[in-house]
Image (cartoon, rainbow, N blue to C red):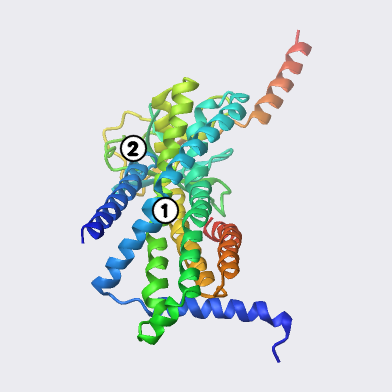
C-alpha cells in the first residue's frame, strides 16, 4: 500500500508539473490573452496600394498597437484595396476624421497601419470608413520618381 | 493463399484491429483510471529528467544558431520568435516523441514482450482477463496523456535554455525577448497545433510499442526484435505523421 501511495504521489507531481508547464508556456510565451479581444469594432479604409501589408498586421496609434488588420480585398468596381481594421473596444473614442496610412517599421520591417487621430468631436463606430488615407510607399516607384526628377533638374538651368 | 508480399498488408490490418480492440476496451471505471495513472508515472514521469535535459540543450543550441544567422541581418532581436515558433510547432512535439519512443516505448514493448515470453499473457486469458484491456490499454492511454505534458516540459525547458543563452550569454535584452514571444507566437495556431500533434504522437508511440510487445515472438530474440521495431517504426511514423499534420493544419 505504501509503495502504491508513493507511485500515485509521483504521478500526481508529474501531472501537476506538466500542466504547470503548459499553463506557463501558454500565458508567458504566446500571445494568449494579448490578442485584440472579442470586444472590438471594425472600420474600413481604402488605399490605392497596400504594398505588402498582410492580414493580422498591427494597427497602431502613436506607435502603440491598438488592433490588427482583419481583411484585405480589392473593390471589384473601383479597383482600390479595401482594408478592414479591427480595433480594440478600449479605444472607442477615436475621432471619425482620423487618417490611416500604411507605414513600415524600420527600413526592412513589416508593414503596419498607422492611425493619426483628427479633431472631430464624433467618435468612430463599427462599420465606419476612414476617408483620409495614405497608401504604402513603394520603394521602386519612389526611386524611379527620384531618378526622373533628378534628370529633369539638370536640364532646366 | 497467403502470398509473402501480402504479409505486410496483413500485419497492418492486425495492428489496426489491435488499436480498435484497445479503443473498444475503454471503460469509465476508477480501476482503469488508477492503472492509467500508475502507467503515466512509469512511462511519463520517469521520462521527465531526460526530456528536461534535452529540452534545455535544444533551446540553447537553437538560440546559438539563430543568433549567429540573424545577427548577419541585424535581426538578433528576433531570436525568441524563431526559437518559440520552431519549438511549439515542430521541435517540441517531434523531439519529445522521439525521446519518448526511446525511453518509454522500448520499456513498454520489452515489458509486454517479456510477459508474453513468460506466459503471463496466456495465463490472463485463461483467467478470462482481457490482456488488451488490462495490459495494453493503460499504457496506451498513459502515453496519450503524458506526451503532451512532456512536450510542455520540453518546450518550457527549451525556452529557459534560450533565455539563458540569448540573455545570459549573448546579452540580448530580456524585455525584447519576452515581448517578441508574447506578440509573435500565436496561441491558436502555433501553441495548440503543437499540443494536438503531441497527443497524436503520444498515442502513436505507445500504441506502436504495445502492438509490438503483443505481437512479439515469445522468445528472448523475439523481445529484442520487438524493442528494436518499436523504436524504428514509431520514429518513422512520428516523422511521417508530423509532415501530414503540418500540411493539413497550415
How many residues crowd mark 1 within 10 Å: few (<14), some (14–19), many (20+)? some
Q: Quadrant of residue A45?
A: top left
| Foreground residue among B84 and A91 | B84
Residue B66 visible from this viewpoint: yes
- In the picture as drawn, the residue positioned furthest to the bottom comes out as B1
The quarter of the rendered structure image containing the N terminus of chain A is bottom left
Image position of B23 (left or right of A148): left
Q: Is residue B163 above or below residue A84?
A: above
Q: Is residue B79 left or right of residue B146?
A: right
Residue B185 position by quadrant: top left
- The reply, left or right, for residue B94 in relation to residue A140 is left
Q: Nearer the viewer, residue B191 or B227?
A: B227
Image height of A102 relative to B187, above or below: above
- Residue A26, horizontal then vertical, whole percent: 36, 45
Question: Which subunit holds the residue at mark 1?
Answer: B
Residue labelled with disc 2: A96
Please provide percent x and percent y for residue A113.
46, 35
Residue B118 or residue B157, whichever sits in front: B118
**Label 1 belongs to which residue?**
B192
Q: At 62% across and 81% down in the image, what residue appears? A: B10
Image marks 2 and 1: residues in contact by CB distance under 8 Å: no
Query: Residue at horizontal 61%, vertical 60%?
Result: B232
Query: Which residue corresponds to the image point at 28% horizontal and 52% vertical from the top-left?
Result: A10
**Mark 2 to mark 1: distance in Å?**
38 Å
Q: Indicate the position of residue A112 as horizontal and vertical percent values.
A: 48, 35
Q: Secondary structure at mark 2?
A: loop
Marks 2 & 1 on one chain: no
Q: Dividing the image into 4 quarters, which one contains the C terminus of chain A?
A: top right
| Secondary structure beneath label 1 | helix
Amino acid at each position: 500500500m505504501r509503495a502504491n501511495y508513493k507511485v500515485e504521489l509521483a504521478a500526481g507531481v508529474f501531472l501537476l508539473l506538466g500542466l504547470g508547464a503548459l499553463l506557463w508556456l501558454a500565458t508567458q510565451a504566446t500571445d494568449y490573452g494579448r490578442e485584440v479581444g472579442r470586444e472590438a469594432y471594425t472600420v474600413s479604409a481604402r488605399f490605392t496600394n497596400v504594398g505588402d501589408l498582410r492580414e493580422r498586421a498591427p494597427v497602431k496609434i502613436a506607435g502603440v498597437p491598438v488592433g490588427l488588420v482583419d481583411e484585405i480585398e480589392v473593390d471589384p468596381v473601383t479597383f482600390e484595396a479595401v482594408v478592414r481594421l479591427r480595433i480594440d473596444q478600449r479605444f472607442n473614442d477615436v475621432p471619425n476624421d482620423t487618417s490611416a496610412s500604411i507605414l513600415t517599421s524600420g527600413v526592412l520591417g513589416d508593414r503596419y497601419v498607422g492611425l493619426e487621430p483628427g479633431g472631430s468631436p464624433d467618435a468612430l463606430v463599427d462599420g465606419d470608413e476612414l476617408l483620409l488615407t495614405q497608401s504604402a510607399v513603394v520603394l521602386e516607384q519612389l526611386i524611379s520618381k527620384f531618378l526622373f526628377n533628378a534628370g529633369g533638374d539638370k536640364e532646366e538651368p | 493463399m497467403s502470398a509473402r508480399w501480402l504479409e505486410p498488408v496483413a500485419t497492418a490490418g492486425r495492428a489496426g484491429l489491435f488499436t480498435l480492440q484497445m479503443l473498444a476496451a475503454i471503460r469509465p471505471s476508477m480501476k482503469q483510471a488508477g492503472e492509467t495513472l500508475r502507467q503515466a508515472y512509469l512511462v511519463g514521469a520517469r521520462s521527465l529528467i531526460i526530456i528536461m535535459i534535452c529540452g534545455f540543450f535544444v533551446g540553447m543550441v537553437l538560440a546559438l544558431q539563430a543568433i549567429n544567422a540573424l545577427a548577419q541581418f541585424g535581426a538578433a532581436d528576433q531570436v525568441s520568435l524563431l526559437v518559440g515558433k520552431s519549438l511549439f510547432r515542430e521541435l517540441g512535439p517531434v523531439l519529445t516523441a522521439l525521446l519518448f519512443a526511446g525511453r518509454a516505448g522500448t520499456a513498454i514493448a520489452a515489458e509486454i514482450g517479456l510477459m508474453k515470453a513468460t506466459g503471463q499473457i496466456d495465463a490472463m486469458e485463461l483467467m478470462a482477463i482481457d490482456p488488451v484491456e488490462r495490459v495494453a490499454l493503460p499504457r496506451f492511454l498513459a502515453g496519450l496523456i503524458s506526451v503532451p505534458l512532456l512536450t510542455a516540459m520540453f518546450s518550457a525547458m527549451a525556452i529557459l535554455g534560450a533565455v539563458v543563452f540569448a540573455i545570459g550569454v549573448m546579452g540580448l535584452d530580456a524585455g525584447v525577448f519576452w515581448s517578441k514571444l508574447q506578440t509573435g507566437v500565436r496561441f491558436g495556431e502555433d501553441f495548440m497545433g503543437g499540443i494536438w500533434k503531441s497527443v497524436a504522437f503520444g498515442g502513436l508511440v505507445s500504441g506502436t510499442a504495445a502492438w509490438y510487445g503483443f505481437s512479439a515472438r515469445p522468445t528472448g530474440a523475439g523481445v529484442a526484435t520487438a524493442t528494436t521495431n518499436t523504436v524504428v517504426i514509431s520514429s518513422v511514423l512520428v516523422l511521417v505523421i508530423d509532415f501530414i499534420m503540418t500540411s493539413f493544419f497550415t
